[in-house]
Image (cartoon, rainbow, N blue to C red):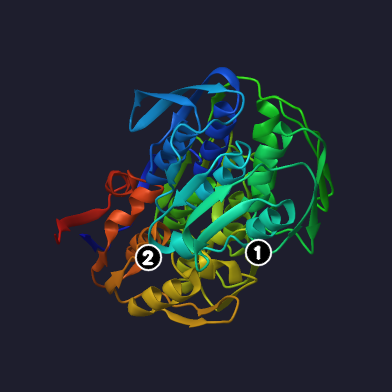
Amino acid sequence: MKTVEINPKKLSGDISVPPSKSVSHRAIMAAALSKGKSRIENVIMSKDIEATCKGLESLGSSIKIEDSGEGRVALTIEGGGMPQVRNDAIDCIESGSTLRFLIPLAALTGEEVTFEGRGKLVERPLDMYYDIFESQGLEYRNEQGRLPLTLKGKLKAGHFKIKGDVSSQFITGLMFALPLVQGDSVIEIVGKLESVGYIDLTIDVLKAFGVSIENDGYSSFYIKGGQSYAPADYRVEGDFSQAAFWLVAGTIGSDVNCLDVDKDSLQGDKEIVDIIKAMGGNIIVSDGSMRASASITRGISIDASQIPDIVPIISVMAALSKGTTIISNASRLRIKESDRIKSTVSELSKLGAVIRELEDGIEIEGRDELEGGVVESWNDHRIAMAMAVASIRCKKPVVINGAESVKKSYPGFWNDFRKLGGDINERDMG
């Protein structure tokens, strides 16, 4: 286990925001489903992206990795147009996107495939897919609702009813697979659709690779069968869920300029910009960059239904804002890499924040500064990174156990923290 000790210090400077993990997953999958060669540029090989690449190779694709400098790679991907089982055991490691995106693709083959995972992933719910398997007569077995999951059978076109308040990853998984089956399909959303931004990203990436999905006001999606993916060259844009850490760092600290972010992005986590502004933060938005500078912020009410991934870092900013912040509609955070409502409240409390766990959210009473202390990452990359940013406004050093968890999405986080002036001591606890 790796531990970092951070001495409180304001961060400042320019930072090149990592490419979007959400877009990377989708572009790599679309390329793997194309008949021919595609090139995906500006990718970071995080643990989650590695899991998706290896899973797609197990389903018949060829992926070559070329170093393009500064920790980024370009991928040359050759697909066969339809998944074919090359390896019948797919290890998704701890990536929920990999698991939920690849299950429908495996179900296109009709062959037996086993999905494995680690950590919290083994117990993340898959009930939406189990309901589909049962209605279509696909065979499956699991370990009392947990991974490993073994699946055999062929996915067919149909009318799929999906609850809007469960993970959008189920919808995305179906959107990738259903264009390749014979016959047209409908995905009907029951209730209000959460995480709309992720569905927008899916549809946009599919369009770039020649696949069309008709969106009827986010209440239904119409998918014509018998389509085919076309190879494409694609550059992955900067990730707002990662930019959020640096934008908050600038807001509660000094001056941080995020490069390689698109002000017109479809990423739902771009809402971090509006949230910071609503709390009184100063952000200057330019073409390709966003600069956050030190601001006096105030508490507000935040609906987290569309932005679950940035709740930990929003909570850090709220803990250092005047007044009360209430974050609501965040119940899905309980089934992430950690129970992020519980882990966020637990670790910020250790740093001296006045924070309380709600059934579906968090209530935070802001302070001018926090105390510091020893915290745990809960093996959750977003908790580790949020606690690192919180150190900026602590009186004493912050020690983070399990700091290696950032490799899940942002392997270069600690290096980038240093580039902005962070004072970090690292040690390996064995």
**Residue at point 56% right, 32% down?**
27
* Badge 1 density bin: few <14, some 14–19, many ≥20, Cα 10 Å: many
Residue 294 location, quadrant: bottom left
Left or right of residue 135, residue 423 in this image? left
The location of residue 276, given as percent across then percent down, is 57, 59
Above or below 25: residue 398: below
Where residue 19 sits: x, y (%)? 47, 37
Image quarter of the C terminus: bottom left
What amino acid is labelled 1 in the image?
Ser
- What crowding class fits label 2: few (fewer than 14 Cα within 10 Å), some (14-19), or many (20 or more)? many
Q: Nearer the viewer, mark 2 or mark 1?
A: 1
Disc count in the image? Answer: 2
**Residue occupying image coordinates x 54% and y 28%:** 32
Residue sitting nearer the eye, 213 or 316: 213
Examine the rendered structure and indicate whether residue 303 appears above or below residue 32.
below
Q: Tell me if residue 151 can be seen.
A: yes
SS type, badge 1: loop
- Cα distance in 3D space between marks 2 and 1: 23 Å
- Give the residue number, with chain letter if any, for mark 1: 305
Front position in the image: 296 or 99: 99
Query: Which quarter of the figure has residue 328?
Result: bottom right
Residue under numbered circle 2: 390
For image coordinates 27% across by 53% down, the residue present is 422
Foreground pick, 296 / 113: 113
**Amino acid at dot 2:** Ala
Image coords of residue 211 (percent x, y)? 72, 29
For this orientation, the residue located farthest to the right is 216
Q: Is residue 95 left or right of residue 188?
A: left
Of mark 2 and mark 1, the one earlier in the sequence is 1
